[in-house]
Image (cartoon, helix red, strand yellow):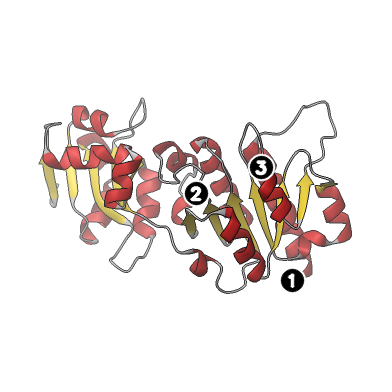
Amino acid sequence: MAGLVELTSIRSPRVKSARRLAKRAFRQQDRRFLAEGPQAVREALALETASGTGLVELYATAEAASRHADLVDAAVKAGVPVLRVSGEVMAELAQTVTPQGLLAVCAFLDVTLERALEGAPKLVTVLSHVRDPGNAGTVLRASDAAGAASVIFTDASVDPYNGKCVRASAGSLFHLPVVTGPRYTTLIPALKAAGLTVLAADGAGTRTLDDLADDGSLARPTAWVFGNEAWGLPEEVRELADDVVRVPIHGKAESLNLATAAAVCLYASARAQRSVS
């Protein structure tokens, strides 16, 4: 296929350069990350950035290039280098057991906190001390679906460009602004200064989500703060929040996992806000 460069050796400098992005330190150094599969490639191509699309280069096996010729053609037309690789090279690059044959190198997407809070956002998601990349990516996806304006990963949280997080986001990483690295001591005051009520989701909350839905509190512009999967939110975060809220358990389940609780909270806010808009 025209426009494709052939790569068959796992020792190729280009392959080594891409493969090292599996490690966070190199992702930070190069400000690039890996995104696997046709959906991620499609979303990266659709993203408009100052330098073009969100795609830096595309690796494809011959079979995948034929099956997804529309994506390969779109990448070539956008001026993105496309490299056709052997199955051995793809297996070396991919972070999944069964690679789909398409792997993109993408530029970092994160924005500053100031930019994320521009324009009086109504709904913002904060991940504080969240370490599991699958949970983080799923919360990012739920935030996108609920219409959140941005997702903020605090300094103690997982890297949003972790391969598992990218896959769990199912393309949503490319849809909304992501902020990385702020400390909660500066973050929470900034959220409040932007007009957001800060709600800390915690199983030990003094108020329930039902309470806030009933009294109209959820209709306010809100930043939801979600904590670590095992031990929840630090006491300092709960103290800085405007309220600590728990999702009520009406059945016999001990608790909800992080991603499920986040989806419930975000959709409750989204529904309340739309009812008064």
Q: Where in the figure is residue 233, as x and y percent of width and height?
A: 66, 42
Q: How many marks?
A: 3
Residue at horizontal 44 percent and vertical 36 percent from the top: 164
Q: Which residue is mark 3?
A: 233
Extreme bottom residue here?
119
Q: Which mark is residue 277?
A: 1
156 or 68, which lies in front?
Answer: 156
Residue 186, placed above or below residue 13 = below
Confirm or deny contact between disc 2 and disc 1 (CB under 8 A).
Answer: no
Q: Tell which of 249 and 58 is nearer to you.
A: 249
Return the disc, 1 or 3, that comes first in the chain's sequence. Answer: 3
User: Sequence order check: which comes first, mark 2 or mark 1?
Assistant: 2
At label 3, the amino acid type is Leu
Quadrant for residue 212, please give it: bottom right
Disc 2/disc 1 C-alpha distance (Å) = 34 Å
Pair 2/1: label in front: 2
Residue 235 seen in the current view: yes
Q: Where, by quadrant of the figure, is residue 77 drawn?
A: bottom left
Q: Could you tell me how far apart the alpha carbons at marks 3 and 2 are, in whole angstroms?
A: 14 Å
Q: Are marks 1 and 3 in contact (CB under 8 Å)?
A: no
Q: Amino acid at mark 2?
A: Asp
Residue 253 in the image: state x and y as whole percent.
78, 27
Name the residue at 17% across, 32% down.
86
Which amino acid does the dot numbered 1 rest on? Ser
Q: Residue at x 85, y 34 (%)?
A: 250
The image shows residue 149 at horizontal and vertical percentages of 57, 62
Left or right of 162? Residue 99 is left
Q: Find numbered disc 3 in the image and state the secondary structure of the residue it sits on.
A: loop
| Label 1: how many Cα within 10 Å (few below 14, some 14–19, many 20+) | few
Instruction: Look at mark 2 in the image and give the residue it sits on.
Output: 155
